[in-house]
Amino acid sequence: MININSCLQEIFGAAIQAAYPDLENPPLVVTPSQQPKFGDYQCNSAMGITQILLKTTEQKVSPREIAEKISKNIPANDCIEKVEIAGPGFINVHLRKDFVSKQLSSLLVNGVQPPALGKRKKVVVDFSSPNIAKEMHVGHLRSTIIGDSMCRLFEFAGYDVLRLNHLGDWGTQFGMLIAHLQDKFPDYLTISPPIGDLQAFYKESKRRFDTEEEFKKRAYQCVVMLQSKNPDFIKAWNLICDVSRKEFQKIYTCLDITLTERGESYYQEMMKDIVQEFEDKGFVQVDDGRKIVFVPGCSVPLTIMKSDGGYTYDTSDLAALRHRLCEEKADIIIYVVDSGQSVHLQTVFAAGQMIGWYDPKVTRVAHAAFGVVLGEDKKKFKTRSGDTVRLIDLLEEGLKRAMDKLKDKERDKVLSEEELRAAQTSVAFGCIKYADLSHNRLNDYVFSFDKMLDDRGNTAAYLLYAFTRIRAIARLASIDEEMLQKAAREEVLILDHEKEWKLGKCLLRFPEIVQKILEDLLLHTLCDYLYELATTFTEFYDNCYCVEKDRQSGQIVKVNMWRLLLCEATAAVMAKGFDILGIKPVQRM
């Protein structure tokens, strides 16, 4: 699909270059117009150019004069009908109807395609990353949902995406878990131990570690045995990891999320090379027996080896970064981790640059930070008893509430059992994901089932319902897929009514939205767009008859095919938006 904003930027870029050939990097500002009387897009570069001319040549030229000069130099193109100069020097752009109509036909025939983005890049996204032997809680929800949606966006754009789950599957806590396993299930090597509740198992071993001196000593010995790769201890470690994996997988299955597991253990063998490399390049200082690295511009040094010879999170994060850059050859690496890790990650990235693993002008390494989940009391989201909310409980509660909502609306009377179940999971998980993604990820967000299941306003419940309604329009007019495809190839989309024109332009902004999010990684922009599209569609549907019926008999008198095609185009763009957000719409709801 064509990104109209990019097209207009190219056109105005050429016009400014022709009008002012001596200007270096002139400002290029093109945005969609907020009101129809100001055309469809606006170029607001004239004001900026006025400032530059004043500074560089001491010429005082009015922005209006500059706008006129730019307008006269607009090259021949397919998309602009006319331009008008308004106010102090805004250039209002009116698009050609036949251009918009052709783009919409192309969308209907070829499907919703990404904007052209050049070379196919390799992208690594590090997200979710829970800890073994601890349950996933509400804090993991954001990383998991945001990370999955980012992956879907990069996949849609045609990039090669590696979705990494950086599990906390290594470290000293495994000593106490293995020691406790040996006491509780001495025959664990031959009979698989029935650890039902790993959380309780973890708490029990932690209590013993804190209170029993003898147990604590054994736990430390177990860590040494594990790190020296003793097969019995590796087996115990694997058993514990497997119990956790099964629990995590239940959540990933619910939310339809796929990940490649690469926990901290994966990087263990690379640690000594990391320390060696920093030593060889003269970056290591010894402080109280610890090996530390000071990174320019960062307040806290990295500790790459403890005084007892053990490694730290800093070492494993550096090893992971190096592997992703040098072995995976990633062009883009995104860490979807909470804002609390910001300083740590910036220091790790800066160390990677300092040692020469990557150049930020060539390779993009970014921390997609996010705020915490709050309860409705605006405090950290906890259960009544003050515990962290388990993720699996939250998802089950969502399912229960979604079913209650559907029954309130008496959907159980019109949907089959299977359709009702599909609607339940679509609404429950769709609403939980959308509530998260529709907020700017940098802010904390208040978790409220009542708000997210409300079918009014910017919620998944409203959008899913709007989508099933749009999908039903053609069906109720007895127009099938084949007839729509034939019409898409043959019909010209007439956009004479102002609401048809408004909807057509809104649909074609989709590639701009995708491109913007690929740059700033803020997914709420897509949610805002989908909500705007749904409300623009409602305006169109209320004002433009798609199917005309006889008032007395209710018989269909006339089908306005071009308008049905606009309905189809809207459904196609919404479906693609849902897909990027990880939401599964249903045909009937």
Image (cartoon, rainbow, N blue to C red):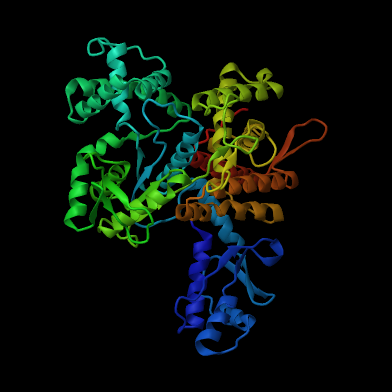
- Please identify the quarter of the rendering in which residue 481 is found: top right
From the top left corner, tell me how far across and down residue 559 is, in percent.
Answer: 68, 41
- Please identify the quarter of the rendering in which residue 64 is found: bottom right
Residue sitting at x 58%, y 51%? 507
From the top left corner, tell me how far across and down residue 92 is, in percent.
Answer: 64, 70
Residue sitting at x 30%, y 26%? 174
Is 60 situated left or right of 3 in this image? right
Asked whether residue 272 appears in the rendered view, the answer is yes
**Image: 276 above or below 11:** above
Residue sitting at x 58%, y 34%? 431
From the top left corner, tell me how far across and down residue 413 is, in percent.
Answer: 68, 18
**Image: 499 above or below 473:** below
From the top left corner, tell me how far across and down residue 392 is, in percent.
Answer: 50, 24
Asked whether residue 562 appears in the rendered view, the answer is no
Residue located farthest toward the bottom when viewing the structure as drawn? 58
In the picture, the quarter occupied by the C terminus is top right
